[in-house]
Image (tube, grey):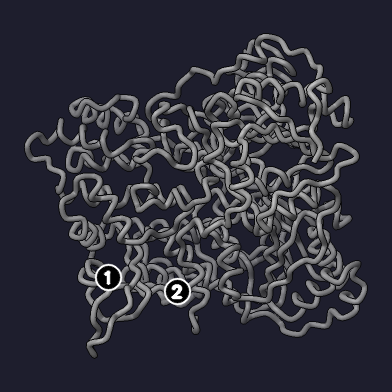
Amino acid sequence: MTALPRGETPGSPGADDADVAAPSTAAPAPSAQDEGHEADEGSPTADVGAAEETDGGADTSSGANEAGGADAESDAASTETDGTSGTDRTTAADGAAEGAADAPAPLSEAEAELAAQRELRERIEKRKAEKGGPIAAGAKLSGQAADLLAAVRAVESGEKPAAAFFDSPAPTAPRRTAPAPAPARPRIPERAPAPQGASPEAVAATAAVLAEGGAPGALAGPAAEALGEQAGDALREDPWRLLAVPGVKPEQADGFARALLGSACGPDDERRTAALVGWLLERAALRGHTALDATAVRAALAERSVTDPAAAVRHAVAEGVVLVFQDDEGDEDVQDSEASAGPGEDAEGGVREPVQVLLGLDRYALAEESLADGLARLVNACEKDADWTQAASAAASPSAAELIRAVAAHGLVAHTGGEAARAEPAALLTAARGLGLRALGAVHSVDGRHRLAEAAGDPSAAVTLAGLLSGTEGPGRDEEGAIAVDLLVVLDAPQLDVETAAILVESLADGTRLVLSGDPGVLGSAGAGRVFADVLAARACPQIVSRTPDPGPIGELVSGIGIGELNQVEAPGKEVVIVPVRDAGEAVHRTVQLVADSVPRAIGVPSADTQVITVGHGGSAGTRALNAALKRRLNPGPGRFGGFDPGDRVVHVPMPGRTVPGVVVSADAEGLHLDCAGTKTVVPQGRVEASVRHGWALSAHQAAAMRWPAVVVVLPGDAAQGLSRPWVYTAFSRAERHLSVVHGVDQALQRAVAQSPAQDRTTRLRTLLEAPAR
């Protein structure tokens, strides 16, 4: 790699470029959260205090840390913050879809199925009955979770009407039984319903209870939304239910409970321990876990002054707060097996291997079970050995031919490779369409859709995954409610979370072929689960490994990082440039010079096509500080539209985990008008602060699945603990023509690349897929 001499970046420094601080505006208490990167990456900004804003999960109050250090094993990229200040967080309400019509559109078939599942889950939570027994990892659900799954499938298959399980009827879609394609009906774009807050009466009643307990009145609205119309009564009966409000910590809930209950409040109150168990699992899900080891949960409870953590976990299981799983099928009682999961003697006097007991929330258990069954259905229902011989022989590369032959013979195929390997799924789509099949490629971002459409030579061959599931893109659904495709290729598969994947697979008819394609070296999904990694690890289907390397010095550098080597590469055209800096202030100054002057002048890439990527949102060289400096240089203005001016480069976050780049066009009473890659978007005024932020600088999680002609990666000294091999691999591989690295972490970069990444998320999907009979 070549270093860019300091004399080659003569830009106009300016005092304000050298002394940049993060914005001081703090978000109100209700939206202040300190979760991991999954919530963080989908959200613009809410400062919650420097004590909680450390990268790599240094906040010891975080759910994953309290659950046995799960955050520490999450490759540091799962926090997406920076070493000194400010973590950005998103509340659940921030993830609601926007742009609703005046009247809600009719529910689609898939939405009706999800609504049915949600209603059944709510009824289960109300009954609070004991679970029927332990659930063995790799086996099907038992107890009420099994009843729920059976009920949903009975409705889907038409064996029983929805009225048999619901108090009120709901539309359902029968299970598809024939692989023959049905004629597609015209797609009707649907708008998501507008988020509906609680009634003013409910908010007022909740505010009164909060006032009695000394809690901020600003929590009334979020509490009423989280707990329903009877939130006030629920909080009076169980003050620790306040933990269901995003951003509320156990210490705050404890103070609220003491104020309401007085001497009747204690650390071992069963209401408190049950709420803590649920809170730990919810926090772990924000870091990607679908389950946690029971030992880690007990340790976290002990740190919260619970004197008998094992009894607390047993109570939470009995109350239906969490489900329990274990990796054998012994006949121990749930409570006994959970409490004695360590080594011991078996019935014959031999040494018994320790049994791993996992705890999980029912929503993720159901999603993983549904996904595993759905993938098995696609594998078994596919027409085997279809004649694609001619299409394979005409493929442009051996890897593309191998992929086509695998898809011809299997209903589920995994494909791995870097950016250049995307040509192989594109060739598969072209071949399938040439055979008269309805073939479609789904990607994670608008940028990815454009790249895939260009590679396939057909704009109609590519859609975004969010657009496909919502019905705003793609062919729509057939008469039976399935997505009208014969072959679906999902690129950027590492970005799939388990709930999205379950919805997608359930939306595919029997006989549909599914290809999951992606680069296993990049950072994982914003939501819970590690779907692509689990499918690969379980070897549940043929795996085609691309032999097409990424070209040029950047491709050579990234390929080395993928195997743990940070190599120097020859870059005669200044494709890779290292810019050493001493401190964060200099890092900001040099970054502004690169984007505004050096890269456009020396490389020929304009500032609008250059993306800055840094380790976290907070800190003296995080996204907020960099965006402030870049705005002053590239588009100065007073920020008259809620902090934004026309021409500002922004990212819109319509839901957690989904980042859409755009440019501010104007603003009026309707909201902030954006141009998002040619799509006109209006963000309502009430949603601007929560879902729009400046976008000259992004985190690596936000940048995943997108690429730019030039990328400037900023590594200030206080970001060292946030580095990992997947983070570096993801950030460096976003560049197409030029990569500048503003380097201030000394040997930490080399160490991060050399360290082999560990499995950073606890999930059950792999064992479910590996089960011998499904």
Instruction: Provide the secondary structure element on which disc 1 rests.
Output: loop
Image position of 641 with respect to 263: above or below: above
The residue nearer to you, when weighing 468 against 107, is 468
Residue 49 left/right relative to 134: right
The residue nearer to you, when weighing 594 against 219, is 594
Residue at which label 2 appears: 154
Residue 79 left/right relative to 339: right
Instruction: Provide the secondary structure element on which disc 2 rests.
Output: helix
Q: Earlier in the sequence, mark 2 or mark 1?
A: 2
Taking the spot 49% from the left edge, 84% from the top edge, the residue there is 773
Q: Position of residue 741 (x, y in %)?
A: 72, 35
Comparing labels 2 and 1, the label whose residue is closer to the camera: 1
Residue 719's image quarter? Answer: top right
Q: Position of residue 69 (x, y in %)?
A: 39, 51
Q: Position of residue 501 (x, y in %)?
A: 57, 60
Contact? badges 2 and 1 (CB < 8 Å) = no
Taking the spot 57% from the left edge, 52% from the top edge, the residue there is 525
Does the rendering let one see residue 150?
yes
User: Label 2 is placed on what type of residue?
Assistant: Ala
Residue 13's image quarter? Answer: top right
How many angstroms separate mark 2 from mark 1 (CA)? 39 Å
Q: Position of residue 252 (x, y in %)?
A: 26, 33
User: Label 1 is placed on what type of residue?
Assistant: Gly
The residue nearer to you, when weighing 272 against 229, is 272
Does the rendering let one see residue 652?
no
Looking at the rendering, in which quadrant would you find the N terminus? top right
Q: Using the image, tell me which numbered label, if any, was put on residue 342.
A: 1
Image position of 124 with respect to 84: above or below: below
Image position of 408 with respect to 709: above or below: below
